Image (cartoon, grey):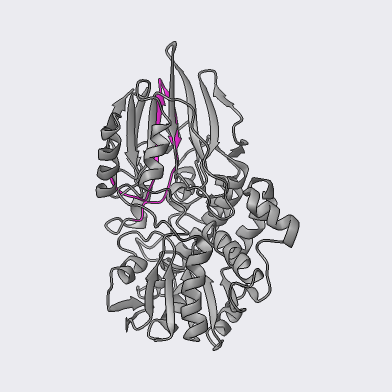
Amino acid sequence: MKLTIHGAARQVTGSMHLLEVGQYKILIDCGLDYEKDRSIQSNENFPFDPASIDVVILTHAHIDHSGNLPTLVRLGFEGQILSTPPTADLTELLLLDSVSIFMKKANQRGKYGKNKGKFNSGSQPLYLQKHVMDTMERFVTIGFNRPFRINGNIELTFVPVGHLLGAGAAVLKINDNGEEKTIAFTGDIGRKNYPVLNDPEELPQVDYLVSESTYGGRFHSKGKSVEETLVEVIDKACIKEQGRMIIPAFSIGRTQSLVFALNKIFSSGLLPPVKVFVDSPMASMATGIFRKYHNLVNQEAQDFYRNQGDEFEFDNLTYVETLKDSRQVSNYFEPCIIISSAGMLEGGRIQDHLFYNIQNYYCTILFIGYCAKGTLGHRLLRGDSIVHIKDRDLAVYATIMKTDVLSAHGDHEDLVNTVKQQDKAKLKQVFLVHGEAESMQALADGLEVEGYSVVVPERDVAYHL
């Protein structure tokens, strides 16, 4: 059995891990790598022949785990893609959104070439809608905690890990030349008591564990609940200062948790009514998927639904659908909250809202999630006084704030505790992926103190298990 970490090696994006059992090749996740030193086009340079992959296992829908699947299919992959049902539905939304982003960027580049209005060499989109549809036809969905036999030697079970609706650690039981071996890939690990989502479940004992490390060495704020934190910030920005608050939020997962938290705040009278705009068509569609799989949301959300109604609807909440309506939101001069994607500010309608409000002293921009290096969100959080938005350099006069109460990633303590569920006498090796180098090292140090053997693998290096 051989493991090679081809993506998210000492970085956050581009999760892609190859597990070989004899001649059988399993790819776990196939995400877009969008680190600042890599072009989107470089994602088609797979370090293996896509046609040689027998099956793909997808831990969850986020684009850094799913976003390169259509490229894999376009270049020859013909096998099944295994995921939970919500992951399949949410992945389709995200992949179609990626196509629209690729097309927009390609058209923008095409405008300035000699073939004006057409794609120039090097500006072709990574994949098209047709490739997304071809990809979705390959999905085979599996419920949580239901063993699925991939072939005579390999059995897969998805174990819920929170983080996102449908997200599951991939636990593989393998007969490797007569010897039973077990390996788990965590995907991304959630945190306890998160709005809408269930807590991560304990993983079974395994021989090898491939774990994410996004928040290695970092600890979430303790003391204040999600609602208490939001009440404090909204009260200052929208009630006392009579201004507006812009919250960049990923359309899938983060927006639904935020809307539920706001619903609880306003329906219980913790704040006077404030107009809330959710400006993301994809968020509206994703919310429909959350409703479809309502049996998988947590008990609090289910109880709220039974007692008070839809947790994703309340007075003064408007889902903005059309671009025309989105532009009218900019002309709404009463205090309001605008929730828009994308969470790291790379594309999406959020850039329009920033363009018109970044120089507004009465605007607060509240970040509620991780922003990778190289993104506009990261530049604002590090305190850049001038940022480039929509072909203009703009001074930053708005108040920039950040809270981690809605981060869907487990922190250092959560990650260590996930590994500590494993018997250190039986767990032979922990491989750390999906984190910046310093985060990985901090988590590795913390796990080694606990007596675990840890590897921080380099990209494309094979490990024989």
Location of residue 149 in the rendering, given as x and y in whole percent from the top left corner: 57, 24
Residue at the top extreme? 178
Location of residue 174 in the rendering, given as x and y in whole percent from the top left corner: 47, 20
300 and 131: which is toward the camera:
300
Residue 310 in view in this figure:
yes
289 and 24: which is toward the camera:
289
User: Is 286 included in the stretch rendered in magenta?
Assistant: no
Indicate the quadrant containing the C terminus: top left, top right, bottom left or bottom right.
top left
The image shows a total of numbered marks equal to 0
Which corner quadrant of the image does residue 269 belong to? bottom right
Note whether 382 is above or below 64 in the view shown.
Answer: below
Note whether 46 is above or below 244 in the view shown.
Answer: above
123 and 237: which is toward the camera:
237
Which corner quadrant of the image does residue 181 belong to? top left
Residue at the front extreme? 223
The magenta span reads 10-34
In the picture, measured across the screen, residue 299 lies left or right of residue 427, that is right
In the picture, measured across the screen, residue 48 lies left or right of residue 63, that is left
Residue 282 in view in this figure:
no
Image point (59%, 81%), residue name = 324
Location of residue 385 in the rendering, given as x and y in whole percent from the top left corner: 27, 79
Note whether 420 is above or below 266 in the view shown.
Answer: above
Note whether 431 is above or below 154 in the view shown.
Answer: below
